[in-house]
Image: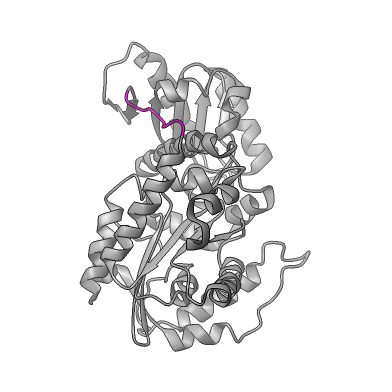
Amino acid sequence: MSIDALVEVSRYYGKNPDYVLAGGGNTSWKTGDTLYVKASGFSLAEAAAGSFVEMDRKALALIWEKTYPESDANDRFGSQRESAVLSDMMAAKKNPHDNKRPSVEALLHDMMPFSFVVHLHPALVNGLTCSQQGEEAAREIFGEEMIWIPSANPGYVLANLVKSAMTGYRGRYGKPARIVFLQNHGVFVSADSTDEIKELYGEIISKIGAMVKRKPDFSDELRITGNKEQKPSRLSESIFSIMLILKTLAGSDYESEKAKLPGAAAFMSSAEISALIKDRASFAPVSSAFTPDHIVYSGSEPLFSGAGEEIKRDWKSHVQKTGRNPKIIAVRGLGVFSAAAAEKAANLALDLFKDAVKVAVYAESFGGPRFMTADQTDFINNWEVERFRSNISTK
């Protein structure tokens, strides 16, 4: 085994949008006392040996022997704890001159007693993990083959939950779990070879797919990026007019009140989306965030609005309420727009919103969609780690 196998399996899934979008997901390989884990913000699709951080497993193990600050009224999001854990993880790098950050989930990768770990967020899988009856359905489909982890804030809190669950699983079954589903997040798959990883993911996709009653249909998708559109449209004039408004609004930095900069916008429509934008009630299945990735790239609160001046009014209200620009703007009866400071970020926002639509459709088969809680959403919106990941991956 070598890091070449890790690079290959990372690219294998990273280049497939059914498994990976933007900087989502991470992979690792263990050999002796060393863990090679994907660096935060790096693309799996473009993985190379330099995309991974070399970690000292003995130093990572010592993290579990430490006591970290608890959240309290003055530190609601546990930023002191997460900052301390991050500092210890950075100190666990074998090369102190390597300025890359290890994935925030490095502790999870390290605790899984297999050579390879591949953590992904496929829309089909999240149709299960982000549904009302996800745990019940997962146990029916996979039985003793998996562990289900209730929704939790990522980082040290999640790692603690998984560690406890894996200890319990080994105690019950006398073996380590190879599949770990994370509610409102994704799935971890572990094995001692990349062929086994691929086999396990194939089984997961096949078994969940067999339970799905309806698949999302984007066969008639219209996508306009910048001044380019994939198909001609009678609505182009009104679409571009709204895009111009959104570019101007997205160029405003409300936090620092800097002068306006050129913004970026993109547009998407399809029959699947049209059904969601008839009115606010129709938009409910995608009106909040399913996973941390959706928050990082497409925001936690999509804006639903009408056209023209109504967008400007609703945008202003959204910023006053949340303190953030909306990244997704659904315009009643027309389609969905994204807005950001740069074109890459606008395109990624649209990609992740499309993913959210897929998740919502798949979730119909498991009791309907289930969003992250308000506290979990606030945690991600205020977590420095996720801001760092977003900044790296949208450049």
Q: Position of residue 290 (x, y in %)?
A: 55, 45
Q: Position of residue 157 (x, y in %)?
A: 62, 68
Q: Observer-nearest residue: 326 or 78?
A: 78
Q: Observer-nearest residue: 242 or 60?
A: 60
Of all residues shown, which one is farthest toward the top? 234
Q: Residue at x 46, y 27 (%)?
A: 336
Q: Residue at x 48, y 67 (%)?
A: 104
Q: Position of residue 159 (x, y in %)?
A: 56, 70
Q: Which residues are magenta?
A: 213-219
Q: How many marks?
A: 0
Q: In the rendered view of the protein, which quadrant contains the N terminus?
A: bottom left
Please identify the quarter of the rendering in which residue 57 is found: bottom left
Q: Position of residue 17 (x, y in %)?
A: 32, 45
Please identify the quarter of the rendering in which residue 393 is found: bottom left
Q: Is residue 254 magenta?
A: no
Q: Residue at x 46, y 78 (%)?
A: 90
Residue 236 relative to residue 208: left or right? left
Q: Residue at x 37, y 46 (%)?
A: 206
Q: How is the image coloured?
A: one colour
**Up/down of 175 relative to 299, above or below:** below
Q: Does residue 201 show up?
A: yes
